[in-house]
Amino acid sequence: MTQPNPHEAAKETINQVADILKLDDWVRESLLNTHREIKVSFPVEMDDGTVKVFTGYRVQHNHMMGPFKGGIRYHWDVNLDEVRALATWMTIKTSVLDLPLGGGKGGVICNPKEMSKKELDKMTRGFARRIAPVIGPLVDIPAPDVYTTAEIMGWIADEYSRCSGKKSPGVITGKSIKDGGSEGRVEATGRGGLFVLQKYLKEIGDNLKGKTIAIQGFGNAGSIFARLAFESGAKIIAVSDSSGAIINEQGLDILAVIKHKEKTRKVGDFPGARNSSNESILEMKCDVLVPAALENVIVRENASKIKAKLILELANGPVSSAGQKALEKKGTVVIPDVLANAGGVQYLIMNGIKT
Ligand code: NAD
């Protein structure tokens, strides 16, 4: 399958909206560009004594509404265009919610699954030192994203505090409670997704009871959404992570799946479900499909095979522009990422941007 350039997709969205809203050219142009982009590299001594040089990015898309805001991703496929797209979507997301925040995003090219905790700690601090001059509690406030955790946020806060010479937990959100984080932040993105889905169903005179749901991605966003939807009466018939999918049309016991994943580090081989491929989950017969992993998983080539009539975008950019057009043609409703996964950033404001 061809992988569309996510930044081109984000720019296409800006252009479409600019046409509809008849925005001034300079506003359109500003939104098509980023305020600032930095690429950093830094050496890290690995556990075996070798020194590896890592590359990372911080893209600050727009701060017309307030400090740049957006997560940091650790993934082997991180690249500048992906980070630009994610930063652009953050600006749209904070604006959709009318928050006093702008949009930014960061990423480091690495495979955190193959790194020890000590290596991750050193790499994180190396990245934090490089971006320290351009972030800050009133300037740019990062957060977790794919394969970054509350503990990693704590390391960034700590390293930034060293660089700035004063304790600055407010430089980053999504930290653990002991590092100054907020109660409920871990659940906020999944919970926000559930609220948006319930609201949509109510609008069309329906509800969640007994709805069959398939979820791709079982990390922070996906697994918490799965648990909350399960507890609210939905029937989760399939979930997946990077190692594959599990399916049970009668409904999965999500609390047991979460325990199984904690124990084995994967959803696969869950007793009472059959294993399947990650791609197959997208094409399952279900009421609601929830992509909650990475971008561009529904594209022109597979859009015709999607059977769900409703898609809740918990991941950022999981449906490409061409995929979206193909889905629209067959009447599939897509609840967009900039609303569906905005619970995390919305939650900050409800807490007075505490941390
Ligand atoms: P995470 O690291 O906690 O979880 C990612 C999940 O995706 C894991 O279960 C992983 O196994 C799975 N995954 C990775 N590659 C996959 C693949 N090729 N196929 C299927 N599954 C795969 O990350 P997260 O924080 O849950 O982020 C997931 C998505 O949600 C991202 O698009 C992120 O930008 C978006 N998002 C997250 C938050 C948040 O607060 N965490 C907020 C808004 C948006």
Image (tube, rainbow, N blue to C red):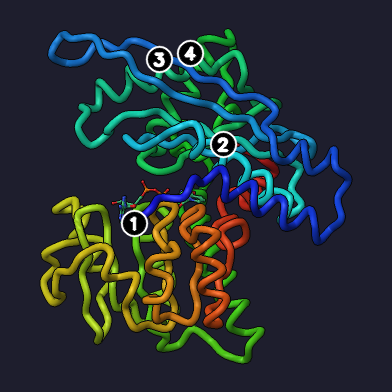
Can you identify the residue that label 4 sits on?
A: 129
Q: CA distance from mark 2 to mark 3?
A: 21 Å
Q: Which residue is mark 1?
A: 1
Q: Nearer the N terminus, badge 1 or badge 2?
A: 1
Between 152 and 244, the one lying in front of the other is 244
Q: Residue at x 13, y 77 (%)?
A: 272
Q: Earlier in the sequence, mark 2 or mark 3?
A: 2
Residue wearing tag 3? 126
Is 240 in front, or is 18? Answer: 18
Q: Indicate the position of residue 320 as horizontal and vertical percent values.
A: 50, 58
Instruction: For marks 4 and 3, give the CA distance.
Output: 5 Å
Q: Nearer the viewer, residue 351 or 18?
A: 18
Mark nearest the camera among 1 and 2 is 1
Q: Is residue 99 visible?
A: yes
Please, what is the three-letter code of the amino acid marked with disc 3? Gly
Instruction: Report which residue position mark 2 lands on.
Output: 84
- When asked about the image quadrant of residue 134, the answer is top right
The label nearer to you, 2 versus 4, is 2
The quadrant of the rendering that contains the C terminus is top right
197 w.r.t. 259: above or below: below
Calculate the distance from the C-alpha at mark 3 to the C-alpha at mark 1: 35 Å
